Image (cartoon, coloured by chain):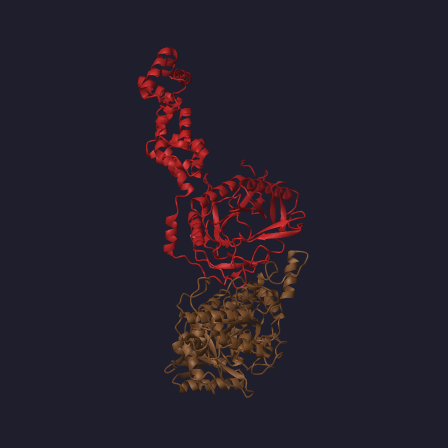
Chain colours: A brown, B red
Amino acid sequence: MSPSALELAGAVRSGERSAREVVEGSLRAIAGGDHAIHAFLEVLADRALADADRVDAAVAAGSDPGALAGVPVALKDNLCTRGVPTTCSSRILAGWRPPYDATVVERLRAAGAVIVGKTNMDEFAMGSSTENSCSGPSRNPHDHGRVPGGSSGGSAAAVAAGFVPLSLGSDTGGSIRQPAAFCGVVGMKPTYGLVSRYGLVAFASSLDQVGPLGATVADVAATFEVIAGHDARDSTSLRAPAPDILASVGEGVVGKRIGLVTELVDGVDHEVAARVREAAEAMTAAGASVEEVSIPQFRYGLAAYYLIAPAEASSNLARFDGVRYGLRVEAPDVAAMNVATRTAGFGAEVKRRIMLGTYALSAGYYDAYYARAQRVRTLVSDGFAYAYAKFDALLGATTPTTAFALGEHTEDPLSMYLSDTCTVPASLAGHPAISVPFGTDRAGLPVGIQAMAPALGEATLFALAGALERAAPGAAGGDR
Amino acid sequence: MSETSAPAGWELVVGLEVHCELATRTKLFCGCPNAFGAEPNTNVCPVCLGLPGSLPVLNRRAVELAMRIGAALHAEIAPSVFHRKYYFYPDMPKDFQISQYDAPINRGGRLELPDGLVVGIERAHLVEDTGKTTHVGGTGRIGGADYALVDYNRAGVPLVEIVSAPDIRSAAQARAYAGELRAILVATGSSDGRMEEGSMRVDANVSVRRPGAPFGTRCEIKNLNSMRSLGRAIEFEAARQAEVLEGGGTVTQQTRHWDEDRGVTLPMRSKEEADDYRYFPEPDLVPLAPDGRWQAEVAASIEPLPAERRAALHRLVGGEPTPAQADQVRSVVASDLDTLVVAACERGAPAPLALVRAANEVAADLTRAPDLDPDAFAKLLMLEGSGELSASQSKAVLAELLVGGGDPAEVARRLGFEPMDRGALDEVIAQVIAEHPEDWARFVAGEDKLKGPLIGAVRRATDNQADPAAVARHLDGLRAARA
């Protein structure tokens, strides 16, 4: 069992271990194992060691090296890193080096974390398997014939493979939680607006949130504390203070009212459903009152999501036109160059969603599609409001199945989309949600339990997540 | 400017869309300087270049200036939403433009022109500017250039687009509207209104119809970079449309470009296939709803508008203004000299004289005008009004005051103008009356035409130092005393 991020930070802060030693260990693990996983698009060895030395210098100087001092962190490749390629796993961004760091990257570094590399993803975060990457798929560390999930598949696999104790992903419709579930790690999507999106290459602006993935709930909570908080560079950033959350991980669920969402149990694979029911029983045993609740509006979530997200994406991705950065395919005039560049630069799934979104926003179709989808989004929020009138938090499956095989859904986009059905409702509502590993299926593949809480309910969410982690069969995270 | 700009038998219908750059320090959604004339692509950052991952943050000052424009146009300041207007063009960094669409910050309103015509305002909304493309080589035109250069310094500069109702009926009215709007933009501190630098750009929607008929099909004319172009382009376009219609044709709705050199409008792109901008609410910005307190603060911060200032001057002069006085009032307000005129009048200067000297001599030297001491100006006008200085002497003294200041009486002495005191003038007039008894008798009997020769005689006797107006008033006074 490798040490947790908080254990590593503690050791570095106390001078017991050097940041360089910790980072070298991570780089060795990547060098030794990533050829089989392909979690990383870019490993930043020199940079990481230089950063580690700065942390060590701070420790030696007696100044505070930060809460995540010396902790190796992997970043999804849609987070801008100054001077370091940021490609979103797309040919169209080949060679682009942002002139700035994303806010979350600044905050991680300020907290002493050391960025060791950029991870593989579905192109522009569109996908649920990391197979839509221009540099080829990542593989699930539990079974190399299976996908790690997506779109933050590289970030989830990097943690599951033990390359890094922590990573950041982004979640638009489940892109942190679903790969976390597939890879058997903890992955959290914060309340919309709690974590700055500045420097996150946009997929669907009204849904995108950056969040942490880690081996333990406490590590994820500590990372969330570091990256959350108001940012003047993001107009949708909430003015709420960064919550003090770490303490709530051990609080337990005594007296908490927890709703088990029928729609997130029925209809999922029976082995996944079995783990969800066991988790619910475990929470009852831990002192919560658990009741089943049906939120029928959830059934329409996926359809609304697959109109809203592509609509926003079609507009967000317009800027990749070959004029200013990234790929340019020469052509006789500007319009032809735009078309040639986009034709060559975008993969099939991205093109599919741009077309879907463009159609949904077109004059004459806007009301029937985009506007209607927004009304359904409100309905889903209403469903949550109804449930949260009775419950402090909700439970369900994170995914309908455990990790599927590489190539299993690539020929049928719609079946791939169904992989997001359990995670999309919290995304549409902007609520926080987390996936916590809870046992396996018969094949030994991890199952993720999804906990959800109302907006800004992170304290409740982490209390429930901590309790799930402690109750999990053969708990990997253990009772820290 | 001719008022008969519509071809015979046709009525001209014009609506104007005016884009004005707001006088903010920074751009609409980022901290880059909003400045004209910098080296290309130096006032740029990830946000205004639309780099992946960047996000817009609304400039509070731009909202405030937009509200000032709204308040000055008597618009309703309403909760508003930004939309994305989506089309591919190299000078748009994001390939969409952030603009207000169906929920603009200013709704409705009106603008009263100096001649009293009221033009309706449909909306005045916030929008970001695009970059600037320069076509290089070949013909230099869009289709025939070798390559294009794009300068993004202007990308993201805040604009307010002011859309008028189709209430304008002549090229002269269009120019008057644009002029008055510019005066309001300047007076509210919202924009510098410089057409030559592109900080105020006008598009004209022009159509013609038979009087009383429904509106005709309109064409939008772009590239109107001066008041002169605006007037010429409207007149040309009206004539062109009338000719098309008189020849049995139909006007095609299209965007046309004004070619200043050739004096013609030319089609830019046809609107047969209506552009689909795929507007949708900008998810990176939150809805904008200035509260009542902020609105009240903005309304209170607005200086008096040109129309009010003109009215104040008219009240000062009193009575029905002559056409010359109306022009002087317009000119004085346009040159920001009304405070000087008011200050001089408060100190006892005659209003008509203050107006004419401000509109002519002071307005001719606007660089020095701000330093002109109102006390000295008032004193000078009183010297002239009482006849102690002639008009030409007064102008000469005023020129000196503008350059070096000083006391008008002393300046006059230095220039060798012996200020004629009242007693001296009385003496000369008495002498002239004595020398021309017949003329005087006929003047007293009511023959006004003899006033001129009498004034001439007084002026000759004073080496042209006596002010003709003062002499005339004096002669009138003496006659009245006899009657």
In the rendered view, would you say B116 is above or below A81? above
The residue drawn where x is 37% and y is 83% is A254
Q: Depth check: B265 or A20 in front? A: A20
Nearer-the-camera pick, A210 or A294: A210
Quarter of the picture holding the C terminus of chain B: top left
Residue A269 appears anywhere in the view: yes
Residue A480 in picture, x, y percent from top left: 42, 82
- The image shows residue B188 at horizontal and vertical percentages of 42, 46
In this orientation, does residue A379 appear?
Answer: no
The relative height of residue A165 versus residue B15 in the rendered view (above or below) is below
Residue B453 coordinates in the image, percent (x, y): 42, 16
Q: Quadrant of residue A217?
A: bottom left
Task: Residue A412: give x, y in percent of width and height.
Answer: 62, 76
Q: Quadrant of residue A356?
A: bottom right
* Front-most of residues A202 and A223: A223
Spot the residue most to the front.
A60
Q: Is residue B163 left or right of residue B372?
A: right
Q: Residue at x 47, y 53 (%)?
A: B26
